[in-house]
């Protein structure tokens, strides 16, 4: 199960829980009024396969990212309003990342959590490092890939 207390969703999920056929992730979307908001979406497990060792693996639809990068944000960083440079999956590798949308909602992501900034227009969102530097993996989605 997921804990949602002002925090992003983790990649893992209890197979017996409702929605076990999907992985939940938080998307940051641009709104028609130029603002932004969080939307919780589900990414379906589109493929199942055996790993040859007796384990069932569930996979999402694969995609080739145009520019995967590792990024380190410095301790104390507070970015004012900005939009995402691309629609991308962001995985927190270490530290705590806080994102605020224009409606005033704030959520935090920790190591192992992922989010999907997709607010490539409008006012965007604020980003802040909590308690030290934050290391991330950015995996932009190709144009037209729908999450």
Image (cartoon, rainbow, N blue to C red):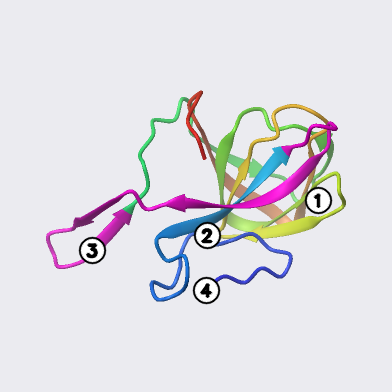
* Pointer 1 or 4: first along the chain: 4
Q: Are marks 2 and 4 in contact (CB under 8 Å)?
A: no
Q: Which residue is mark 3?
A: 56
Q: Secondary structure beneath disc 3?
A: strand
Label 3, label 1: how many angstroms apart (C-alpha)? Answer: 42 Å
Q: Is residue 100 visible?
A: yes
Please tell me whether residue 15 is drawn above or below residue 105 in the rendered image: below
Q: Is residue 70 left or right of residue 58?
A: right
Question: Which numbered disc flags the more N-terminal residue, 3 or 1?
Answer: 3
Callout 1: helix, strand or loop? loop
State the separation of the CA atoms marked 3 and 4: 19 Å
**3D distance between C-alphas at marks 2 and 3:** 21 Å
Q: Position of residue 87 (x, y in %)?
A: 59, 33
- For the magenta stretch, what is the residue range? 30-58
Q: Which residue is mark 1?
A: 76
Q: Is residue 131 visible?
A: no
Taking depth in this image into account, of 127 and 44 the one nearest to the observer is: 44
Residue marked by disc 4: 1
Q: Is residue 108 left or right of residue 52?
A: right
């Amino acid at each position: 199960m997921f804990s949602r207390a002002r925090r992003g969703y983790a990649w893992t999920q209890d197979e017996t829980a409702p929605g076990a056929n999907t992985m939940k992730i938080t998307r940051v979307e641009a709104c028609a009024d130029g603002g932004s908001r969080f939307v919780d979406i589900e990414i379906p497990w589109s493929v199942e396969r055996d790993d040859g060792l007796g384990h069932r693996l569930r996979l999402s639809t694969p995609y080739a990212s145009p520019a995967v990068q590792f990024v380190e944000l410095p301790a104390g960083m507070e970015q004012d309003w900005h939009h995402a440079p691309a629609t991308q999956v962001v995985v927190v590798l270490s530290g705590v990342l806080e994102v605020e949308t224009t409606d005033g909602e704030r959520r935090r992501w920790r190591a192992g959590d992922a989010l999907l900034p997709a607010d490539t227009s409008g006012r965007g969102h604020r980003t802040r490092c909590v308690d030290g530097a934050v290391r991330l993996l950015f995996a932009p989605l190709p144009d037209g890939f729908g999450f």
